[in-house]
Image (cartoon, coloured by chain):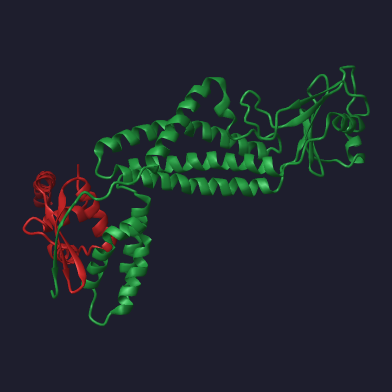
Amino acid sequence: MSLQEPSFLILSALTTRPLHGYGLVSEVQKLSAGRVRLSVGTLYGALDRLAEQGFVSVDREETVGGRLRRYYVLTDEGAEALAAEVNHLRANADLAASMLRKRAAQSAPRLAAS
Amino acid sequence: MKSYQAWCRLALFAFPRDYRRRRGPEMLATLLDGSCPGQTRPSVRELLGIVAGGLRCRLRLRPGAGPLVLACSTVLTTAILGGAAATWLAWAITSPALPSDAEAKAIAQAVVGAAPAGVRRTSIPYHLDFDVEQLSGVEVAFPDNGLAWAPRRLNTEGWSVARADNYGLVAYRADLKMTVLLYSRPLLLRIDHAEPPIVTTATIAGFLLCGLGGWLLNARLGRRCAGRPAVSAWIVAVGALTIEFFLPLCFYALVEYIGGHINGGQAEPVWSPLGWQWVRVLAGTGVAMAIALLVVSLMPVPPDTATPRKRSMSTG
């Protein structure tokens, strides 16, 4: 089962420590070098699905300055799913890289001949 | 900041009430944490993100083509069946009584210019008797003695011809519709009610409302399935089988119904194919499954099983 990019980045963000909603938005933005900024709708939709699949669970709740912060933690199943996805992506990337190397090797003699 | 908060609270109404109750304060906190100092309202992108997320949550649309196909099939099936039910209701409520046998004979005699041989009444308006697939009407037969049909009498009797070809003729007068079957021996005249104007409106309203109902049913079942793969698999299997029983028939019936209207001829009731002998068992099974799904959807949605530890801090 392939993870969608927001889910992949959320699981990646939770690998080291539990994070609350805004913490996840910030961490995902940082991990993707500013490319992915999760909207609240996308974030909670993804968290619902990940929780249903058992990949994340609620760690604790805090009320800070009157604001409810719910922290999410990566479960063992989530870590396994993330590792499987990493292997899958790595295999695809390796395959694409080897094909590109082949292409470069084939076109080098032609360039030399011309 | 209060204005920003008010905007966020308003946008969060896109989510269902029970979801807002569970997630609302947390989502609001995330939005407030992400706001800039002095910001008075969320950006359009943020607002669209919240509303889109809310609608997706309301519709319980999961990623992937399968759930979308199942949801659309459910909507289409319930919409067509709802449209059919609304059509029946509109006919039953608004359609006046058909002419009596004597009145029908008199109408037919005036038009044909000869004494009819007999009268036969068929069913009730948009009946539920699956054995007869015709709409209600009075059929008047004439003796087979080489009677010549004289269409010009129609005009003198106040009928206006809507359609005529080698096989038949359809004419209207006030709220009555007359169909003359020219190929029939003996000559046969059929008198029905013209479709009351409210019927089309009712059909469209029934179609839209029941389509919406189908979507909500789908959403409700989706919520019942959440986090329960076994329940989910059963509901999806029963749902898919139900759709399997109904959808082809609904499509056929819809095409027949629309085709009947376009041709100006007799439009069969949308559910009439469900009464075909060979389909009856399947249709009955489909109805039983649909009722089972409805009962499951009406059961209360289980609450979140997560029981997080709570902690309060004054600053942060």
Q: Is residue B312 above or below residue B302?
A: below
Please state the horizontal and vertical placement of residue B89, each as a whole percent of the image.
63, 42
Residue A7 is left or right of residue B3, and the answer is left
- Looking at the image, which residue sits at the far left? A16
Q: Is residue B6 above or below residue A88?
A: below
Q: What's the residue at 34%, 74% (across, down)?
A: B6
The letter of the red chain is A
Residue B11 is left or right of residue B148, and the answer is left
The letter of the green chain is B
Q: What's the residue at 51%, 45% (across, down)?
A: B210
Q: Nearer the viewer, residue B111 or B13?
A: B13
Which corner quadrant of the image does residue B311 belong to? bottom left
Q: Nearer the viewer, residue B38 or A111?
A: B38
Residue B219 is left or right of residue A24, and the answer is right
Q: What's the residue at 57%, 26% (across, down)?
A: B275
Q: Is residue B253 above or below residue A36?
A: above
